[in-house]
Image (cartoon, rainbow, N blue to C red):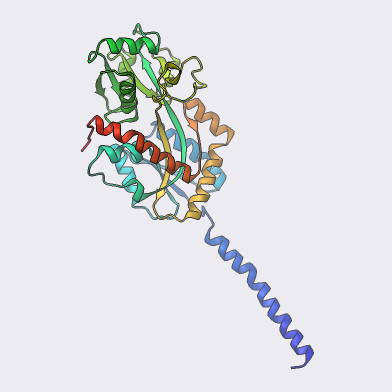
Amino acid sequence: MTRRPLLLHLLAMAALAAAALPRAAGSQSSQFAYPARPIRWIVPYPAGAGADIVARTIGTQLAIDAGQPVTIENRAGGNTALGAIEAARAPADGYTLLSADNGTLVFNPALYRNLSYNPSRDFAPVTLLGRLPMVLLVGPSSGVKDARAFIDDARAFPGKVSFASAGTGSPQHLAMALLERQAGLQMVHVPYRGAAPALADVAGGQLPVMMCDLAASRRFIQSGRLRALAVAHPARLAQLPGVPTFAELGMPQVEAAALMGLVVPANTPEEIVARLQRSVASAIHNPAVQRKLAEFGAEPVGDAPAQFAALLQGESARWHPLIRDLNLSLD
């Protein structure tokens, strides 16, 4: 082969190789293009519940940022099990999300011997959306003015003080059970079917006290129908600056919140989980979203999957022994 044909041959080969490079890069990026179609977000609570409001607030911004619709699908029932099962059966492609709180991921495995899903086996953690701190509440007719007085009265009359909750094994129930344990109290638990009727009865004077998340109780507090005595949070809440923490009262172990997290079906590709986490965290940190969540009573988070997974492990280690000691079972 002469020098000129050889040169032409080499140039042709180089041109073919250069032409192939953009196609290869393009095929690789399209392989991980996410999201490329609408996202389904399952909320295992009715419309209007705290988890629903958090999901819709964040999901609206996520849809704007991602350029794809985010559809909220309410699947209430079975103490969140119905929604969890639906999500666990979905394709592991990042297009089905599940709002999963500490009831779904932490409490249910200890409350049910025959749970229809397995949190660690069926789901991959994405991020903690936010915390809904618990607050100790009494009705306005109560003569109790502060948390110390309430604890002293309850301690003086063991078995005589009743407290309401959103249901057996709910975050509200277990938060009060934790206070009982740490303060040496003996009270009577009266479970309701949800936080709303429990709050209404405490505000109406049918029951004297309950522990409830700020998101559910804030309107009762703002209207004066309930009085906040203490918050089960490491620091005072911006929404209740005059209300002390239990740590300030000498009980730092009384810390409890409803945790609102996001998970996807197990075996979802790590690249998809990482992209989803970044997108959701970006939506959470949007100033308008943060303002709405704070007004609602939620503390926005948006942490990494590994941090969320570590939190769930720590919460299980903290709450499962208490559930066992109380001999609680929902089977």
Determine whether 147 is above or below 131 in the image.
above
Residue found at x 59% / y 33%: 287
Q: How many marks?
A: 0
Query: Furthest-bottom residue in view?
Result: 1
Q: Position of residue 78 (x, y in %)?
A: 27, 39
Judge left or right: residue 169 versus residue 61: left
Residue at 54% over, 46% down? 278
Q: Quadrant of residue 22?
A: bottom right
Residue 223 shows up from this direction: yes
Location of residue 133 in the rendering, given as x and y in whole percent from the top left corner? 43, 27
Residue sitting at the far top: 143
Residue 117: x, y in percent? Answer: 29, 47
Residue at (74, 88) in percent of width and height: 6
In the image, 215 versus 330, the foreground residue is 330
Identity of the residue furthest to the right in this view: 4
Q: Quadrant of residue 169?
A: top left
Residue 268 image point, x, y percent: 43, 54
